[in-house]
Image (cartoon, helix red, strand yellow):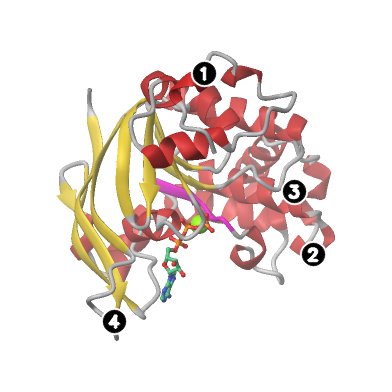
Amino acid sequence: MTELLRIEHLGISPRNDPQHMLVKNISLSLARGKTTCIVGESGSGKSLTALSIMQLLSKQLVMQGRVLFEGQDISRLDNAQMQCIRGKQIGMIFQEPMTSLNPVLTVGFQIGEPLQIHIGLKGSALKQKVASLMTQVGIDPARADSYPDELSGGQRQRVMIAMSIACEPALLIADEPTTALDVTVQAQVLRLLDALKDRMQMAMLFITHDFGVVADIADDVIVMFRGEIVERGPVSQVLNQPQHPYTRALLACVPDAEGKKQLQPIRYDWLTPA
Ligand SMILES: Nc1ncnc2c1ncn2[C@@H]1O[C@H](COP(=O)(O)OP(=O)(O)OP(=O)(O)O)[C@@H](O)[C@H]1O
Ligand SMILES: [Mg+2]
């Protein structure tokens, strides 16, 4: 395993209430070419964990621990140094695309911005690359001159995905990236991310509520509960032989709907009755 990112003893608490740990003693390691899914109920600290890697936590919060990226502790870098890493070496798809896009800039400009800043692409080469990225995420490149509010929620989410993968980052952090998409587009985007991961040997940290997605793309799974990791392991182990009662409860909540066929091998006799 080639380790790309390591989080050591991450803790997050409100600045004005340091005893109240929102995230407690999280340690994890991500390898190149592998996808790790984080699952857990709402409020369990998934997004805070993701944001802390990028040093994008709110100023009201304080962080303990270290984040090592390619062996370097990036939790101590200043903002200018982080800017060079964000969007280039580490891409992030945020949970709320509406608040992450600039309403006064066209989506084509915003997809091209990281390519201009980090790689120096311009002119027709830039335009071509933006069109190719838009095609890859399933948006007609003719929409490049549209503004975010002229697109649907799902299209905006796809713009965010195109921006995040533009520079082919070594690590992609995706916080519920496909929740707003319909099933067909979701499948298409998952295939795209999976293919990029294989082609670029990209590491992916993928936050989701959807065990169908987990079964589809995860190599490893981390289960969070109330700010802590309660279970982790290879996807087949966590889905088929969940050890922690909370993981069993989460799996027991998975709806028995069509489209969840990947979950059929799960032995529900392992689960405690709801
Ligand atoms: N700026 C903040 N100040 C105080 N508490 C916060 C702040 N941001 C988040 N929290 C709290 O930290 C906890 C973890 O939040 P987080 O956003 O990481 O949850 P999550 O697991 O991503 O949930 P969801 O699945 O709903 O996205 C929550 O209880 C949340 O209310
Ligand atoms: Mg979240």
**Residue corresponding to mark 2:** 149
**Residue corresponding to mark 3:** 154
- Of 189 and 258, which appears nearest the observer? 258
In the image, the segment drawn in magenta is 90-95
Query: What amino acid type is highlighted by mark number 4?
Result: Arg
Nearest to N terminus: mark 1 or mark 2: 2
Q: Secondary structure at mark 2?
A: helix
Query: What amino acid type is highlighted by mark number 1?
Result: Ile
Q: Give how far across and how far down residue 13 sits, in percent.
A: 29, 72
- Residue at 54 percent across and 55 percent down: it is 94
Nearest to N terminus: mark 4 or mark 3: 4
With respect to residue 103, does 186 lie above or below? Answer: above
Q: Give how far across and how far down residue 37 sits, in percent.
A: 43, 36
In the picture, the disc for residue 15 is 4
Q: Residue furthest top?
A: 265
Q: CA distance from mark 4 to mark 3?
A: 35 Å
Asked if ligand 2 lies within 8 A of label 2, the reply is no
Ligand 1 found in image quarter:
bottom left
- Of 248 and 33, which appears nearest the observer? 248
